[in-house]
C-alpha cells in the first residue's frame, strides 16, 4: 500500500486565482540547508511562478527561509531554482505556457516515499473576478448544504 506524500507547503492562493488544467511533478535542485529548512515548513510559494528558458525549467519567487543552524552554508532565500524534469515534459510545458493565458504555477511542495522534496506544478488559466465570485458562491452553497444535512441527521 502506498503512503500519502507528506505535504510541506501549499500554495492556497493558486486555487483562488487560477483554474488548474493539468498537474505535473518535478524535482528541485536544492542545497542541504534548503532541504532542512523546507522540512521544517519554512518555505513560501505564494508569489512563485515557473518559466522555461533554453529547454530548462526554473522556479522564481519561491522563498525558503535560511536554516537557523546553517550559517555559512545558507543561500539566498529568493534565488532562482532549477526544476528537474524530463526534457520532453519541459518542452511540452514551454509550448503550452505560450498559449493564450496559460501559466505554470507551483501548487505544493511535498516529500515522496523516498524522502525527496518534490514540487507539484499546475498548468493554470487565470480566473476573472466573476469566476472568483462564482467559486465563492459555490463554496458557500456547499457549506450551507453540509450544515443542513448535519442538523437533519442529529
Image (cartoon, rainbow, N blue to C red):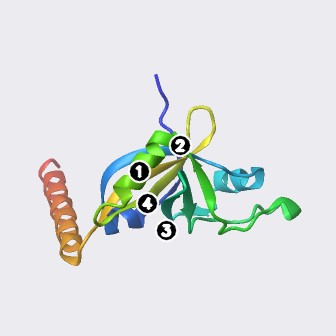
Give the residue displayed 20% in from the left and 74% down from the top. 133
Give the residue displayed 51% in from the left and 66% down from the top. 48
Whichever of labels 3 and 4 marks the residue nearer the N terminus, that label is 3
- Distance (Cα) linking label 1 and label 3: 21 Å
Dot 3: element: loop
Pinpoint residue 151: horizontal percent, then vertical percent: 16, 55
Whichever of labels 1 and 3 marks the residue nearer the N terminus, that label is 3
Q: Is residue 132 above or below residue 108?
A: below
Quick check: marks 4 and 1 in contact, CB under 8 Å? no
Please identify the residue farthest to the right as the structure is shown.
72
Q: Horizontally, is 35 left or right of 111 in the view?
A: right
The label shown at residue 93 is: 1
Q: Nearer the viewer, mark 1 or mark 3?
A: 1
Whichever of labels 4 and 1 marks the residue nearer the N terminus, that label is 1
- Distance (Cα) linking label 1 and label 2: 10 Å
Find disc 3 in the rendering and name its residue: 46
Q: Horizontally, is 111 left or right of 120 in the view?
A: right
- Distance (Cα) linking label 4 and label 1: 11 Å
Amino acid at each position: 500500500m502506498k503512503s500519502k506524500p507528506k505535504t510541506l507547503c501549499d500554495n492556497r492562493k493558486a486555487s483562488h486565482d487560477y483554474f488548474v488544467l493539468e498537474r505535473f511533478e518535478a524535482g528541485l535542485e536544492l542545497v542541504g540547508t534548503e532541504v532542512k529548512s523546507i522540512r521544517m515548513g519554512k518555505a513560501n510559494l505564494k508569489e512563485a511562478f515557473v518559466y522555461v528558458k533554453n529547454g530548462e525549467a526554473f522556479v522564481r519567487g519561491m522563498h525558503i527561509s535560511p536554516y537557523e543552524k546553517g550559517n555559512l552554508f545558507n543561500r539566498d532565500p529568493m534565488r532562482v531554482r532549477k526544476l528537474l524534469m524530463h526534457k520532453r515534459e519541459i518542452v511540452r510545458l514551454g509550448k503550452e505556457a505560450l498559449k493564450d493565458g496559460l501559466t505554470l504555477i507551483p501548487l505544493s511542495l511535498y516529500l515522496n516515499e523516498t524522502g525527496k522534496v518534490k514540487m507539484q506544478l499546475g498548468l493554470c488559466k487565470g480566473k476573472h473576478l466573476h469566476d472568483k465570485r462564482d467559486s465563492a458562491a459555490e463554496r458557500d452553497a456547499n457549506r450551507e448544504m453540509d450544515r443542513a444535512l448535519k442538523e437533519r441527521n442529529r
